[in-house]
Amino acid sequence: MSDASRFVVRRLNWRPAGDRFIRLPGETRLTSFDSFDAAEADRAARESEVRDRVNPFRCGTAWHALTTIPEPMFRDWVADVGLTPPGGGLDPWAAWWAEGHANWTAEQRWHVWAGLNRVRFFEVIERPASAVAFAVVRVMWQYNDQYYEPGSEGGLTVRAYRTRDRAEAECRRLEEQARREWDARHFAETWRWELDSWPALHEEGGFEEDEAFDRRGARLYEVVEVDVGEGAP
Amino acid sequence: VSRTMFLVVRRAVQDDGAGCGDQGGPDTGSRVPLRLFASREAAERRVAELTAEARRTMNPFHLNDYEVPDPIRKYLKKLRLSACPKEQWAEQWEEWWDRCADEMTDDQRAAVWAMFGALVPYEVIEIEVDE
C-alpha cells in the first residue's frame, strides 16, 4: 500500500436538540481525496449547502457556543457590512437571521457566518492513503409499540474489510437476507442522522416498508468508512 | 485472510444527546465505528485522546439530561465557579457551561467533568478484518 497522504472530509457532530442544534463529540468520515485542494473544495461545497439551510443562531445554546467574538463586538462586526443588529440574546438573533438573510447580499451572509467562527459543519484532515478500512454495520432497529426505528446513528459492527468493494458486497448480501426476514406488518421510521437531509429539525413519522427502504434509503446494514491507526499492516 | 483487530467506537447518541436507548433499556448496543488498530494498547490510547478532546470541547451537561443532584451542586460551589445556577434543572446548567466555559481554568473544567464519570463513552471492541 502507498504511504501517500489522503485528505479526508469529515462531518462534525451537530445534533438537533429541541429547536436548536448542539455539537457533540465525534466526527463522521464522508469521503477522501488525493489533494488538499480537492478535499477543501468538497468541504466548502458541503459547508455552503448546509449554510443555505441552517439558521446559525440556532446552533448552540448560548452565545459562546457560536463564536469567540463577544456579543457587543459582534454587533459592530455585522454593522461593518451595513446590517442593523437586533436586540441581545440568541432568539432575537435567530429571528433577525430568519427574517432578513434572504434579502442580504452573499457578501453580507458570508460575513455573518465568518464571524460565527464556532459554527462549522465539516473539516479536512490529512491521513495516510493506506489508513482506511470499511466496517459493515448492522443498524439496530427497535420496535417502539408503534413502528420500527433505526436509532439516530451507528449500530453493531459485524466485520471490516480493507476494500470498499468487498465491504459493499457483504453489506448487500446481509441486507438482502435481512429484508427477506423483515417483519413487514409494522411501519418503519426512516429518520436517521446519517441520511442526506442532515442537518434538519425533522418531524417524525412512519412509512410502509417499500417507502422506507426503497425510496427513502433506510438501511438494515451500512458500510462505514473508518480510519486505520498505527501498527496496522 | 482475516485477522483480529481492535476497533475504537463511540456510543451512539440520540438527537437529544442522550445515549441510544429504547423501552427495553438505556442502551441499544449501537456504536459508531471510528478507527481500527492492530493492538489493544494503541486503541486504548486513542480512547484516552478522544475522551480528553471531548472534555475540552463539549458541554458535559448535554449528556446529563436529568436534574443535577444536590451533592454535585455543592461540589461545584466549592470550585468557586462564577454565577452557578441555584436550581437543579439540567437546562440551566447547560446554559451556564456555555456562558462560563471559556473563563474556566483547565483544572476547573476537568473537575466538572470528573463528576460525570464514564460519560462520553468511547470503547474498544474486537472485530475480524478481511485483508
Image: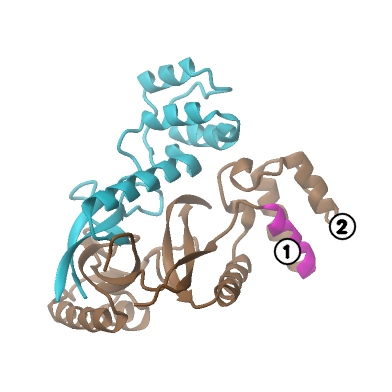
Quarter containing the N terminus of chain A? bottom left
Mark 1 residue type: Trp
Quarter containing the C terminus of chain A? bottom left
- Residue A133 is left or right of residue B89, and the answer is left
Q: Are marks 2 and 1 in contact (CB under 8 Å)?
A: no
Q: Position of residue A88 (x, y in %)?
A: 73, 40
Chain (cyan)? B
Q: Mark 2, mark 1: which one is toward the viewer?
A: 1
Q: Chain of mark 1?
A: A
Chain (brown)? A
- Residue A107 is left or right of residue A43, and the answer is right
Mark 2 residue type: Gly
Report the number of numbered marks.
2
Binning the other alpha carbons within 10 Å of mark 2 as few (below 14), some (14 to 19) or many (20 upward) gives few
Q: Which residues are magenta?
A: A104-116
- Magenta segment: does it hold A193? no
For the stretch drawn in magenta, the main secondary structure is: helix
- SS for dot 1: helix
- Residue A30 is left or right of residue A90, and the answer is left
Q: Chain of mark 2?
A: A
Residue at 46 percent of width and 15 percent of height: B78
Residue at 45 percent of width and 21 percent of height: B76
How far apart are the two marked residues, 2 and 1, measured between alpha carbons?
13 Å
Binning the other alpha carbons within 10 Å of mark 1 as few (below 14), some (14 to 19) or many (20 upward) gives some
| Residue position marked by numbered label 2 in the rendering | A82
Q: Position of residue A229 (x, y in %)?
A: 33, 61
Q: Position of residue A149 (x, y in %)?
A: 28, 64
- Magenta segment: does it hold A106? yes
Question: Looking at the image, which is closer to me, A88 or A126?
Answer: A126
- Residue B32 is left or right of residue A181, and the answer is right
Q: Is residue A89 positioned above or below A117 on the image?
A: above
| Residue position marked by numbered label 1 in the rendering | A110
